Amino acid sequence: MQIIGVDRRRVRPILTVWLMATALLVALGGGAQAADAAVVTDEARVVLSGTVDVARGETVRDLIVLHGAVNVDGVVDGSVVVLDGPVAVRGTVTRDVVAVNGTVVVEDGGHIGHDLVSPRSPRIARGATIDGTVHRVRTDWGLRSVAVPWFWSWLAVSVSTLALGALLTLLAPQAVDAALTTVRTRPGGVLAGVAVAMVGLPAVAVLAIITVIGIPFGVGLLLAFALLYAVGYVALAWLAGRVIRPGPGSELSAFAVGWVILRVAALVPIIEGLLWFPGAAVGLGVLGAAAWRARRPSSAPAPPTLPAAGAPA
């Protein structure tokens, strides 16, 4: 048995490259096969779910498995990458074996031409041969590794929405009052606006992309959603704060109160998800209904008619 060494570094270029290749191949949809498809192919084989058996005497190219087991008794002329599942090598893999979440067993007579990457200590028989290096990759799912990125994400969203809300408050201080008036006087229009923001706009974008001709419009609309729903989120904070601080001349303080309420509630991940799409859609729909109402001319009283000439006053 030939093992050059054990490296406990957490990040390996080969792992990154193969994960990117996997995501690309799955996204493109080309080459994705079921587990019971033919094993002899001139291109990489991508299996979404299932067990892949390379029988003795068979030769295949690269194997990429998202979920499932790989048993190599024949020859893999390339690499084996498994995201979730075990790998057993009794034959030959000419390049690398990468198991992101699973065990690797190299039995007697098994041969790996390059590196072996695994999150757990592999079982390597005495008669197995590994020409490269055995790399131990640790996947850290500790509280700190999850909480720290989540906190920075929460902080970034908090700062950006605070800045956007303050800017909109200074530029359009009467917008929230008009929105509240619309909620009280035109509830049907508000519901229609919310339906458009929650269902209509995403549906238009998806339909445009499906028609192929409208792909630029659909993609542009999807990209615009980030700003649109951020404005809706700020509007929701405005409305919430205005309910608590209804007095005139308190637009900025009302927004600050509503913003604090939403950002504290966003500390709970489930609530944060509800606030970002349904909540932002509500705010955007209310603003849209108020804008639609504002564009309609108000009914002004008719001017007094002047008496005809010679008629008594």
Image: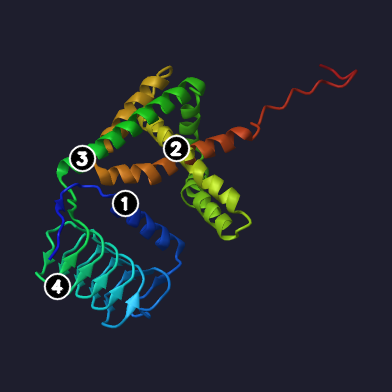
Amino acid type, residue under disc 4 in the picture: Glu
Other-residue count near label 1 (Cα within 10 Å), few / some / many at <14 / 14–19 / ≥20: few
* Secondary element at tag 1: helix
Q: In the rendered view of the protein, which quadrant contains the N terminus? A: bottom left
Residue 95 location, x and y as percent?
29, 63
Q: How far apart are the two marked residues, 4 and 1, measured between alpha carbons?
A: 27 Å
Question: Mark 3 or mark 1, which has the lower sequence index?
Answer: 1
Asked if the residue under mark 4 is in contact with the one under mark 3, i.e. CB atoms within 8 Å, the reply is no
- Identify which amino acid the numbered label 2 is placed on: Gly
The label shown at residue 232 is: 2
Helix, strand or loop at mark 3: helix
- From the viewer's side, name the closer residue of 251 and 129: 129
Mark toward the start of the polypeptide (3 vs 2): 3
User: Of the residues tagged 3 and 1, which is closer to the observer?
Assistant: 1
The disc placed on residue 26 is none
- The tag on residue 16 is 1
Q: In the rendered view, would you say 1 is above or below 162?
A: below
Contact? badges 4 and 2 (CB < 8 Å) = no
Give the number of the disc on residue 107: 4
Which residue is rendered at x = 33% and y = 32% of the image?
156
Percent across and percent down for residue 208 are: 58, 55
Q: Which amino acid, by three-letter code, is at mark 1?
A: Thr
The image quadrant that residue 161 belongs to is: top left
Residue nearer the viewer, 235 or 128 = 128
N-terminal label among 2 and 1: 1
Quadrant of res 22: bottom left
What amino acid is at disc 3?
Answer: Ala
